[in-house]
Amino acid sequence: MGIERLTTLAFSMYTNKGAYALLLGAGISRSAHIPSGWEVENMLIEQLAATQGVADIEDWHQWYKDKYGDSATYSSLLEELVKEPTERVQLMRGFFEPTDEERELGWKKPTKAHEAIAKLAKEGYIRVILTTNFDRLLERALEAEDVIPQVICHESDIEKSTPIVHGKNVTIIKINGDYIDCRFRNTTEELDNYPEAMKNYVNRIFEDYGLITCGWSATWDKGLVDIINGSSSSRYNSFFTNVGEASDVMKTLAASRRGEIMRIKEADDLFTELHEQVVALEQSNTSRRLNYDVMMSRVKKYLSSEQYNINYSDLIEKFGTEAYDKIMAKANYNFTITPEQFSAYSELHHNAVKPLIDIAILAGRWGKAYHIEAFEDVLVKLCTKPIKSGDSYIDGTQYLHALGATLLLNAIGIACVKYERYTELNKILKLSVPAGNFIGFYRKSLLSLLGSTHWSYDELNRLAGINYIYPWSFILLERLRSHFIGCFTVDSEYENTFYIWEHLKSLVYGYNQCYMFDRFYVPTGQFLRSRVEYKMRQNGEEPYSVFFDNADKLKGEWEPIKQGMFNGNYDEYKKNFDQAEESYKQNMSY
C-alpha cells in the first residue's frame, strides 16, 4: 500500500471530520466468507435444479435461462423455492449467517475492516456508508461499538428516514438491498437503472461528500457508475482503492471525479491502518490543543489591561515571525503549480497563520484599537519576499506566497464586521507593502495584493479540485469557517457576515483605487449571487440585506461611514457604490 496516499487520506479524513462517504462492495466481506450476490444466485439455482434431479452443471445461470427462457433473479428463484416471506428470510439466512461449524471457524462475522470502520463511525469520522452488499456485518460491527445505525435498504425507506445532516449516528444505504428484506437488485437490468428516488438520494451524497471506495470494482454496477459520473464534483477528494490493477471503468470514474486510484493490499489493512493514523493525529492534536488553550487564555489576559500591552505585542511578533519563517522556508516558486502543490501550500500557509487568526478574532471582539493594529506589521511582512540574486519563478506560482496573508486579512475583516470595528479595519485596508513583495519591484497597496485572487476562476477551480462560479469565495469561506465556531449563533450567520465583508472589501478596493491602470474595477464574489437570495428571504430581513439597506437609511450615521470609512462621507460612499454596481454588471459570472 502506498503509505504516502494512505497518509493523505488519513489527513483528509481527520481535518474534514464526517465529510467522507464510504462506498463498499463485495470485496470488503470476502475474508468473512460471505458469498457475493452472483454466488448466492448460483447456489439457489443449484438447489432448484436439485429438486428436479439435475446436478453437475458448469454454468448454472445459463441452465436456468435455457430451462425457463429468462435470466435468473432473486425474486423468481425465491418464488420457485419457497412461497411465504418468512420462509424466504429463513432460506437467505443460511447464506449470510454462520452455522455452528462456521462460527467455530470464525466465518461470517465482522472483519477487521468492518471493526475499524465502526470505530471511525463511532468517533464521528464517517457518517455515511453506501454498500452494494446484502450482509449485515457492518450493522453488527457498529452495534458492538454501541452505535445504532440508520439503515436504508429500499427506496421506500428514504421518505421516512432522518436527513443525514441531522442524524446523530451513521447512515447505511444498502443500494442493492438487504438479505432479510429479499427485495434485491442483482440482475443487469436492475443494476443498470436505479429507481428515481434512490438515484436522487445517492446523487446528493456524491455531491456533498468526498468518496472512499473499497471492495468495489465499478465493473458490474453501471447504474451506480452513471450516478457518480452525473453528480457534480464534491469539494472533497475521492479515493478509489483497489487490490491489484484498477478496472478501466474505475480509472475513467476516478478521472471524471478528479479522484485518485489507490492500490491496497486488502480491505482489512486499509481500514485498520487508516483508523490507527487518524487516532494518532487526534492524539497529537489533543496535546497541541492543550498548548493552544493555554495560549488563548494568555491572550485574553493580555487583552484585559493596558499593563500587558508589551506582552501582547511580543506575542504577536513571535507568532508573526514564526509564520513568516515557515512560509519563507518553502518560498521557492520556480515550478509549474499543480493541484497537489496548491493543496500542500494551502495547508502550509493555513497552519502557519492559525494562531494569528484566532488571536485576531479575540482582539476584534474584546480588544482595544491597539490590539487590532498590532496585526498591521504582520500582514505587511507576510506579503514580502526579499529578492535574492538568482531568484526566478514561473508566472502564477508566486501567488502562493499570499495564501497565509490573505487568510489572515479576511479573518480580521470578518471579525471587524461582526464586532463593528470599522475604524481599525479602515486603517488596515489603507496599508501599503514596500518593494520586494510577492508581486514585484514596486510598492503596492495591501488590498491590491490581497483583495482578490490573482488566478483566473477557471485556474482556481482546477487547482482546488472544485467547480464553483466564484471559487475564491468558497475557498476562503470554508477555510475560515472553523475559526469562527462559537462567534455566531448559527452557521448561516457566519456566511451572512462573510458576504457582508466580501462586498465591503470590494467597495473599499474600488474606493482606494487598488485596481491597475486608470479603469475603475472592483472584485466580484459569491456575495453577488447570495444577495439575490437574501433579498428574497423574509422580506429582506437577512443581516446582509439589512446591513447595506441601512447605508441609504442612516447615511452619515451608518457605522462604517460614522467610523471613517469612505472618508466618513455618505455621498462618496454612494458614488463609489453606484460605480461598483456598474462594474459588477460588466464582470459578473452567472
Image (tube, helix red, strand yellow):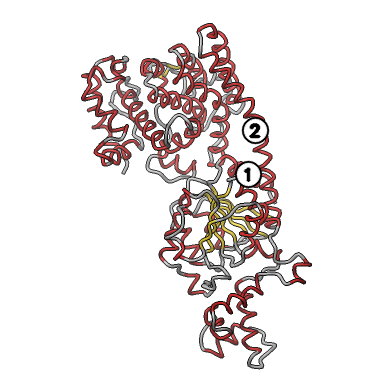
Q: Amino acid at mark 2?
A: Thr
For residue 434, say whether it is visible.
no
Query: Left of 393 or right of it: where is 26?
Result: right
- Whether 177 is drawn above or below 275: the answer is below
Q: Residue at x 61, y 83 (%)?
A: 45
- Whether 459 is drawn above or below 105: the answer is above
Q: Dot 1, how many residues are within 10 Å of its Cα: few (below 14), some (14-19), or many (20+)?
A: many
Asked which quadrant contains residue 325, the reply is top right
Q: Amino acid at mark 1?
A: Ala
Determine which residue is flagged by label 1.
10
For residue 572, say whether it is visible.
yes
Q: Dot 2, how many residues are within 10 Å of its Cα: few (below 14), some (14-19), or many (20+)?
A: few
Residue 402 in the image: x percent, y percent?
A: 49, 27
Residue 425 in the image: x percent, y percent?
A: 39, 19
Asked if the residue at tag 1 contacts the one at tag 2, i.e. Cβ–Cβ closer than 8 Å, the answer is no
Query: Left of 426 or right of it: where is 478?
Result: right
- Whether 303 is drawn above or below 210: the answer is above
Determine which residue is flagged by label 2.
286
